[in-house]
């Protein structure tokens, strides 16, 4: 690749290609088609797509042999995606077919460059008109060969993202399946799947017998600093049962009046506007700089942190959280934790062994998630530099 500086060429260009790109409209290099209702159709093998992706399969197609790019007409308008023929689209999704002089993958990447939300034509639900889409400007090389070369790069990136996303999902599904089999279900005292060398019934005890709690920090906007200070972990720092550091807040160390987070602590969301986040947690796997948790978090310390982290991932824990909160309360209090009881393996060795299994799975899941994110960042950077 070669770095360029001209306004009429991208900042980064593939070797062997030169000449200025031309600015044109989407309508000049493609044909836009409306989606239709599908409910009168029978079941079949033709996929139906909406703004959120695949919906159902029917027995007829709107496009039989022409691949296209789907662009939302109403609702989700900022996430175009490629549609492989044959397919049907609903009436909230346009499908746009590039002409023979325009490569599909390049065209799709170009469409991603458009700020569709800025072209929203409605005051309520985001909407686009066919005229708005057709009049949107894109820049293209003067040869189909360069389009195809650029398109191939982004096709390969998308294929890699999809491949690792499927692997990530498979690992998550494997973890869920193991959770159901390696922890006793309601009414049982032994798990369906037991690690070799362990036997005996699991025994019920209070959660408070296995953990100690520490509170989070209450701070004001004036306490926040840009550089230095103490890191405050919040709900946004908990993703996929691991810590994420892409949204960090630091406060002046002088305002800290709570315990610092230590390795093997578990931090948990106990209060949030979103009920779905209550109970989400992460195990602190290593040393951190001076770090505390926010006021809407609780810290938990245990002699068996890996087992406890796995327990907090089970449906058994989620059901007790839901039962404790009821229909209107979006928080878990210390009193609610005290009332929670679970079955525990009869020996610490079995707890350690179970914890090790799920720690390994969590590591694999987190590694895949990080790799997917790095691929997406690489794609975003290339889109910015390889297009005008």
Image (cartoon, rainbow, N blue to C red):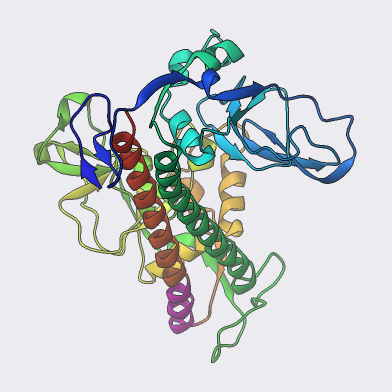
Quadrant for the C terminus, please: top left
Residue 87 in the image: state x and y as whole percent: 73, 39
Majority secondary structure in the magenta region? helix
Q: Quadrant of residue 183?
A: bottom right
Q: Nearer the viewer, residue 347 or 180?
A: 180
At x 45%, y 48%, the residue is 152
Residue 137 visible, this angle: no
What residue is at 39 percent from the left and 71 percent from the top? Answer: 304
Instruction: Classify residue 84 by image quadrant.
Output: top right
Span highlighted in magenta in the image? 347-357
Instruction: Decide whether residue 352 is among the magenta residues.
Output: yes
Q: Tell which of 202 and 253 is nearer to you.
A: 253
Q: Horizontal placement of 260 versus 303: left or right? A: left
In the image, 62 versus 53, the foreground residue is 62
Give the answer, above or below, for where 273 lies relative to 209. above
Residue 285 in picture, x, y percent from top left? 30, 63
Above-or-below relation of 154 to 173:
above
Residue 146 rendering spot, x and y as whole percentages = 39, 41
User: Considering only vertical position in the picture, is 387 above or below 351?
Assistant: above
Is residue 331 inside the magenta stretch?
A: no
Q: Please give the name of the residue rendered at 57% of the width and 62% of the height, measured from the top-left corner.
A: 170
Residue depicted at x 38% and y 32%:
141
The one nearer the camera, 202 or 136, is 136
Position of residue 336 measured from the top left corner of the image (x, y, whole percent): 51, 47
Q: Is residue 201 visible?
A: yes
């Amino acid at each position: 690749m070669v770095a360029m500086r001209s306004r009429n060429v991208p900042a980064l260009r593939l070797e062997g290609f030169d000449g200025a790109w031309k600015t044109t409209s989407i309508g000049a290099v493609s044909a836009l088609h409306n989606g239709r209702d599908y409910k009168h159709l029978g079941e079949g093998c033709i996929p139906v797509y909406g703004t959120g992706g695949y919906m159902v399969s029917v027995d007829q197609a709107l496009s039989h042999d022409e691949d296209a790019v789907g662009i939302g007409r109403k609702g989700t308008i900022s996430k175009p995606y490629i549609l492989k023929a044959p397919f049907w689209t609903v009436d909230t999704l346009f499908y746009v077919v590039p002409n023979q002089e325009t490569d599909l993958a390049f065209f799709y990447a170009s469409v991603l460059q458009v700020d569709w939300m800025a072209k929203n034509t409605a005051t309520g639900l985001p909407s686009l008109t066919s005229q708005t889409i057709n009049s949107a400007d894109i820049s293209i090389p003067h040869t189909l060969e360069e389009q195809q070369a650029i398109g191939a790069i982004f096709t390969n990136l998308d294929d890699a993202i999809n491949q690792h996303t499927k692997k990530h999902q498979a690992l998550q599904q494997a973890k869920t399946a193991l959770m159901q089999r390696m922890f006793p279900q309601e009414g049982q005292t032994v798990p369906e799947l037991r690690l070799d060398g362990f036997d005996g019934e699991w025994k019920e005890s209070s959660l408070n017998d296995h953990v100690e709690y520490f509170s989070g920090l209450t701070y004001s906007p004036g306490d926040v600093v840009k550089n230095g200070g103490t890191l405050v972990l919040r709900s946004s720092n908990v993703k996929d049962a691991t810590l994420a550091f892409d949204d960090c807040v630091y406060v002046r160390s002088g305002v800290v009046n709570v315990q610092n987070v230590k390795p093997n602590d578990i931090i948990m969301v106990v209060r949030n506007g979103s009920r779905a986040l209550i109970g989400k947690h992460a195990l602190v796997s290593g040393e951190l700089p001076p770090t505390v948790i926010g006021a809407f978090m609780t810290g938990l310390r245990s002699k068996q942190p890996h087992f406890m982290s796995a327990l907090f991932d089970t449906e058994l824990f989620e059901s007790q959280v839901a039962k404790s909160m009821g229909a209107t309360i979006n928080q878990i209090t210390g009193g609610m934790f005290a009332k929670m009881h679970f079955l525990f393996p009869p020996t610490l060795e079995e707890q350690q062994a179970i914890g090790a299994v799920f720690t390994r799975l969590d590591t694999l899941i987190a590694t895949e998630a990080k790799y997917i994110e790095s691929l997406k960042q690489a794609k975003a950077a290339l889109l910015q530099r390889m297009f005008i």
